[in-house]
C-alpha cells in the first residue's frame, strides 16, 4: 500500500496544532449565505468549516444544485459552450443527476486558447477583478478571470487547505511561489491571510536571501514547489546552517508532480510535515485539493467547489474505479470562467475520503498524459527518472530530459544537477549509476549528464522537464 492510499502518517507537531480564534472567512459563492466555508457556529477559523462537516448526501445535493447552475451559466453566457452542448445534443436541463454530467462534452486547453483572451468569460469585464494567465511558452496563453466572489472562494479554499495542513491563525507563512500572472503566489498569499496567518511574500528566486528571511522572520509554514524546497535546503547547508533547526514545521508543496521519495527527503532534511497541495489556473489555482496532516494519504478534493472525474486518458469513457486515469474537473461556483469537464492532463486516481469522509481523495499526481515519452517502444514518465535520481548519492532531483534524433534513432539524455560539492570524478560515477538504474528499471538506454547546481533554467521555481528536439533532428 502506498502512502497515498493508506491512512498512516505522523500526527501534526504541537506548534502546528494549537487552534486560535480568527475572523471568519468571507462568502463562498454568489448569492449564498451563510458561507459554506465559514467556520461552524461556536467554532474558530482553526477548525473545519461547515462544508467539511457535511455528510455525503448533503454534499451530493449541494453539488447537483451548483452543477445545474454552472451548466446554465456556461450555456447562456459562453458561445463555445453553447456550440459544444448543441453539437452533443444536450442542454443544461438534461442534467438531473450527477451521473448526467457524463453526457456533456469535455473542455480542453485548446478550447481556452480558441477563446483567447476573453471569449470563455461568462460575465462582463466590469465584473472581472483580476486576470491570470499561463506562460504561453508552448503556444497561445490561456487567460483566466476572477470576479469578487471568485476571489473570495479562492481565498476560502486555500485557507481551508492551510488548516487541513496544520496551519493556524497567527502562524507566519513564507510564500516562495512565483507572484505575477502565475496563480501560485497570489493564491497562496490571500488564502493565508484569509486563514488568519501572517504572510511573508518572498516569491521565487534569490535563494540565499530567502534562507536569511526564514532564519530571521521564523515562519512556521512554507509554500513552494517541492523542487525549489530542495534548493532552499541545499542553500541552508551551503551556508553551514542545519535546515532541521529552522522554525518551519509544515510545508505545502505543489505546482509540479513529485514522489514519495521526495517527500521523505524533504521531511528528513528539513524536519517538516511535507504535504501536497493541488490546483491549476484553468480551474481556480492552488487550493483545489489538499493533503491532510493527520493522515498524509492523498489529497482531499474540495468537492463543494470542484467536481472531479477520472477518465480514460486515451478516450472519452470513465476509467475503472480505483485505477489511474486523466483527472477532469467541473467548477461548481466560478462566475467569470466556469469550466465544464476540463481535461487537466494530470494522471491520478480517485479514492474514498478519510480525514474528510464526504470528500473524495485524489492520489498524488504521478505525471501528465502529455509528459509520457515513448522512446523506442518504451513508455517513460519523468517521475520514474526522479525516483532513480533520488536514490543516487550526490544527485539532486532537478533534472531535464532532452530528446533528440540521430538518423532514425531516438535518443534521450538525462541532464541532472549534482548536490553541492560534488567533484568531477563523483559526477562521472553518479552519471554511470543513473544510466545503469534507468536501463534496469525502465529498460531504456540513456545518456546521462550530471551538471553543476543551479545550471538548469527554471520558470517560477519549476524546471521544464522535457525538451523535445526530435523534429529538428538535433
Image (cartoon, helix red, strand yellow):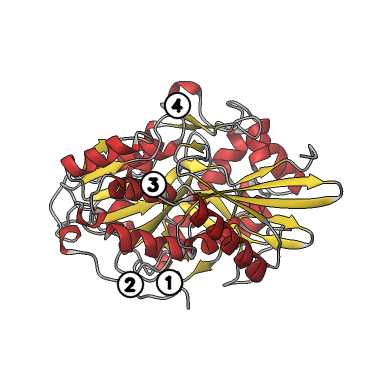
Per the image, label 1 sits on a secondary structure element best described as loop
Q: How far apart are marks 1 and 3 (CA)?
A: 24 Å
Which quarter of the picture shows residue 121?
Answer: top right
Q: Could you give the CA–CA distance between mark 4 and mark 2, rounded to whole angstroms? A: 42 Å
Across and down, in percent, residue 382 comes to 59, 56
Separation of marks 2 and 3 at Cα, in angstroms:
25 Å
Disc number at residue 3?
A: 1
In-image side of 124 versus 24 (left or right): right
Looking at the image, is mark 4 or mark 1 nearer the viewer? 1
Q: Which of marks 4 and 3 is nearer the N terminus?
A: 4
Proximity of marks 2 and 1: CB atoms separated by less than 8 Å: yes
Q: Earlier in the sequence, mark 4 or mark 1?
A: 1
Q: Residue 128 has which mark? A: 4
Task: Specify few, some or many for label 4: CA neighbours under 10 Å numbering under 14, 14-19, or 20 or more.
Answer: many
For label 3, the residue is 231
**Contact, CB < 8 Å: mark 1 with mark 3?**
no
335 above or below 331? above
Amino acid at each position: 500500500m502506498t502512502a497515498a492510499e493508506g491512512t498512516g502518517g505522523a500526527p501534526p507537531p504541537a506548534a502546528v496544532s494549537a487552534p486560535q480564534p480568527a475572523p471568519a472567512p468571507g462568502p463562498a459563492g454568489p448569492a449564498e449565505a451563510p458561507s459554506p466555508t465559514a467556520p461552524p457556529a461556536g467554532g474558530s477559523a482553526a477548525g473545519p468549516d461547515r462544508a467539511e462537516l457535511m455528510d455525503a448526501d448533503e454534499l451530493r445535493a449541494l453539488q447537483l444544485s451548483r452543477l445545474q447552475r454552472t451548466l446554465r451559466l456556461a450555456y447562456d453566457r459562453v458561445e463555445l459552450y453553447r456550440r459544444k452542448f448543441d453539437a452533443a445534443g444536450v442542454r443544461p436541463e438534461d442534467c438531473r443527476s450527477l451521473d448526467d454530467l457524463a453526457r456533456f462534452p469535455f473542455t480542453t486547453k485548446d478550447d481556452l486558447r480558441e477563446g483567447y483572451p476573453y471569449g470563455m468569460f461568462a460575465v462582463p469585464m466590469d465584473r472581472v477583478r483580476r486576470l491570470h494567465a499561463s506562460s504561453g511558452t508552448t503556444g497561445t496563453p490561456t487567460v483566466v478571470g476572477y470576479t469578487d466572489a471568485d476571489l473570495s472562494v479562492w481565498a476560502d479554499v486555500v485557507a481551508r487547505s492551510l488548516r487541513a495542513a496544520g496551519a493556524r491563525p497567527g502562524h507566519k507563512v513564507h510564500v516562495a511561489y512565483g507572484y505575477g500572472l502565475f496563480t501560485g503566489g497570489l493564491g497562496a498569499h490571500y488564502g493565508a491571510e484569509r486563514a488568519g496567518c501572517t504572510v511573508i511574500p518572498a516569491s521565487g528566486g534569490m535563494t540565499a536571501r530567502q534562507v536569511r528571511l526564514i532564519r530571521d522572520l521564523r515562519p512556521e509554514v512554507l509554500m513552494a514547489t517541492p523542487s525549489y524546497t530542495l534548493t532552499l535546503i541545499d542553500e541552508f547547508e551551503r551556508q553551514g546552517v542545519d535546515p532541521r533547526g529552522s522554525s518551519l514545521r509544515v510545508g505545502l508543496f505543489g505546482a509540479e508532480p513529485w514522489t514519495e521519495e521526495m517527500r521523505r527527503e524533504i521531511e528528513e532534511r528539513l524536519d517538516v510535515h511535507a504535504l501536497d497541495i493541488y490546483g491549476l489556473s484553468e480551474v481556480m489555482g492552488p487550493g483545489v485539493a489538499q493533503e491532510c496532516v493527520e493522515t498524509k494519504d492523498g489529497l482531499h478534493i474540495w468537492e463543494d467547489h470542484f467536481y472531479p472525474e477520472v477518465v480514460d486518458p486515451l478516450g472519452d469513457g470513465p476509467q475503472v474505479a480505483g485505477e489511474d486515469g486523466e483527472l477532469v474537473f467541473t467548477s461548481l461556483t466560478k462566475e467569470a470562467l466556469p469550466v465544464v469537464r476540463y481535461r487537466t492532463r494530470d494522471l491520478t486516481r480517485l479514492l474514498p475520503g478519510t480525514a474528510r469522509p464526504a470528500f473524495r481523495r485524489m492520489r498524488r499526481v504521478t505525471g501528465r498524459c502529455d509528459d509520457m515519452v515513448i522512446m523506442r517502444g518504451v513508455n517513460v514518465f519523468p517521475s520514474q527518472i526522479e525516483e532513480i535520481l533520488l536514490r543516487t548519492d550526490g544527485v539532486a532531483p532537478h533534472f531535464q530530459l532532452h530528446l533528440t534524433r540521430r538518423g532514425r534513432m531516438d535518443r534521450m539524455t538525462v541532464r541532472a544537477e549534482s548536490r553541492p560539492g560534488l567533484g568531477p570524478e563523483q559526477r562521472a560515477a553518479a552519471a554511470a549509476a543513473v544510466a545503469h538504474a534507468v536501463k534496469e528499471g525502465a529498460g531504456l538506454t540513456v545518456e546521462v549528464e550530471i551538471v553543476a547546481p543551479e545550471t538548469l533554467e527554471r520558470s517560477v521555481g519549476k524546471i521544464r522537464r522535457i525538451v523535445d528536439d526530435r523534429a529538428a533532428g538535433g
